[in-house]
């Protein structure tokens, strides 16, 4: 980013930060003078921890695809900008997984590694899409595990990792520091929360083991605050049930469990008009919600999440801030018309700070 553009981004963020936290104009002027000098001399500037923390929270508040933004100000921010080695990075990620899980009471958490620096190697790259993710294997009898992980599983095997070939093998963490060869690290199972999915009344999976990990930790997005890019900043909230029950376990190109569920429920699958898919989806989602609750792991159903989002909208309106959103992502994949979100238009303008997609490093 050009120095002039970086200064404009920094200026806009700092003015927002000082205004929202009701800090003095003299403090703002002094801080902007320091930042302007840093940018002129080095082409970059450094956030204080307070700026970093608030920027990460506001980035969540501005995330158009997220329905869980009511809790944006509860995000716990870990400053990991001091890392030097791949082992340092793994230690921070290990602690993130353990602390976010919090014995089932999931904590919204982000760990922020060093930012991009002009004309230098990028200090930390995390190759995983999520810190927790199941492997996928192509076999003579079809795909075992998560089809979404097929390519990355091959990459991990190329680096020397070997899974057990089960449907629920946790992929290793793949970390690259200062453009050195990537290293993989096996996750200790004792820090990973996994929930066995069982229907409260019926064996909908024909005796097979179905489970899912408790914490969705996105690790391949770029966090941008005031023009500074933190390309390694894994973060998590907690699951909305439909993410697992209506997508991960149900989608045809994922675990594709709807036909099995329908068979176990004795449904007529010859015609779509019997709504066998709809019935199966509801029962699969019931199983997910009941299983997480039984295991004492935080989760929210889509109706409650929509009501929480409505509270967020009302709170933001009182603060004079427009709530932006991507409608197609905000509506749940199950019974969307039963939520207020379905019936509202949203402005999909991107506000900063924010989280942005970036290409996978392993590609």
Image: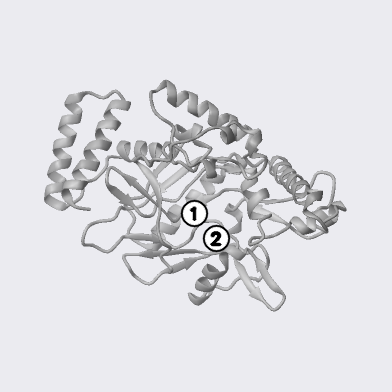
Query: For residue 188, what is the image quadrant?
Result: bottom right
Of the pair 306 and 95, the residue shown nearer to us: 306
Crowding near the residue tagged with mark 1, few <14, some 14–19, many ≥20 C-alpha atoms within 10 Å = some
Report the disc number at residue 119: none
Vertical position of residue 5 compared to residue 186: above or below: above
Residue 150 in picture, x, y percent from top left: 57, 69
From the image, which quarter does the C terminus lie in? bottom left
Circle 2 SS class: loop
256 sits to left or right of 66? right
Give the spatial CA distance, label 1 vs label 2: 8 Å
Circle 1 SS class: helix
Vertical position of residue 20 compared to residue 92: above or below: above
Q: Earlier in the sequence, mark 1 or mark 2?
A: 1
Vertical position of residue 95 compared to residue 76: above or below: below
Q: Residue at x 57, y 33 (%)?
A: 343
Residue 269 in picture, x, y percent from top left: 82, 56
In the picture of the structure, the residue carrying the numbered disc 1 is 94
Query: For residue 298, what is the image quadrant?
Result: top right
Do the residues bearing badges 1 and 2 touch, measured as CB atoms within 8 Å? yes
In the picture of the structure, the residue carrying the numbered disc 2 is 187
Crowding near the residue tagged with mark 2, few <14, some 14–19, many ≥20 C-alpha atoms within 10 Å = some
Q: Residue at x 81, y 54 (%)?
A: 262
325 sits to left or right of 134? left
Q: Residue at x 53, y 74 (%)?
A: 157
């Amino acid at each position: 980013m050009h120095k002039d553009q970086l200064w404009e981004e920094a200026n806009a963020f700092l003015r927002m930060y000082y205004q929202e936290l009701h800090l003095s104009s003299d403090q703002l002027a002094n801080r902007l003078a320091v930042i302007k000098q840093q940018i002129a001399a080095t082409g970059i500037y450094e956030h204080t921890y307070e700026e970093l923390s608030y920027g990460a929270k506001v980035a969540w508040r501005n995330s158009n695809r997220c329905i869980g933004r009511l809790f944006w100000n509860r995000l716990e921010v870990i400053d990991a900008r001091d890392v030097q080695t791949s082992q340092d990075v793994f230690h921070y990620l290990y602690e993130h997984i353990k602390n976010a899980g919090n014995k089932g009471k999931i904590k919204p958490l982000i760990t922020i590694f060093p930012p991009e620096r002009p004309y230098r190697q990028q200090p930390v790259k995390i190759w995983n899409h999520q810190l927790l993710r199941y492997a996928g294997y192509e076999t003579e009898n079809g795909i075992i595990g998560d089809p979404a992980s097929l390519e990355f599983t091959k990459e991990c095997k190329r680096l020397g990792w070997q899974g057990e070939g089960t449907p629920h093998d946790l992929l290793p963490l793949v970390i690259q520091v200062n453009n050195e060869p990537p290293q993989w690290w096996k996750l200790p199972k004792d820090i990973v929360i996994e929930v066995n999915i069982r229907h409260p009344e019926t064996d909908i999976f024909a005796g097979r083991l179905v489970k899912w990990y408790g914490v969705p930790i996105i690790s391949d997005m770029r966090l941008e605050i005031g023009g500074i890019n933190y390309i390694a900043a894994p973060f998590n909230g907690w699951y909305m049930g439909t993410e697992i029950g209506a997508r991960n376990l149900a989608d045809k190109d994922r675990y594709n469990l709807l036909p099995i569920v329908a068979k176990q429920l004795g449904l007529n699958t010859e015609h779509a008009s019997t709504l066998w898919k709809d019935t199966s989806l509801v029962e699969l989602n019931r199983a997910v919600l009941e299983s997480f609750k039984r295991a004492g792991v935080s989760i929210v159903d889509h109706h409650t999440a929509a009501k929480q989002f409505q509270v967020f909208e009302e709170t933001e309106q009182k603060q004079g801030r427009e709530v932006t959103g991507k409608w197609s992502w905000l509506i749940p994949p199950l019974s969307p018309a039963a939520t207020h979100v379905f019936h509202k238009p949203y402005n999909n303008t991107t506000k900063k700070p924010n989280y942005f997609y970036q290409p996978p490093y392993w590609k």
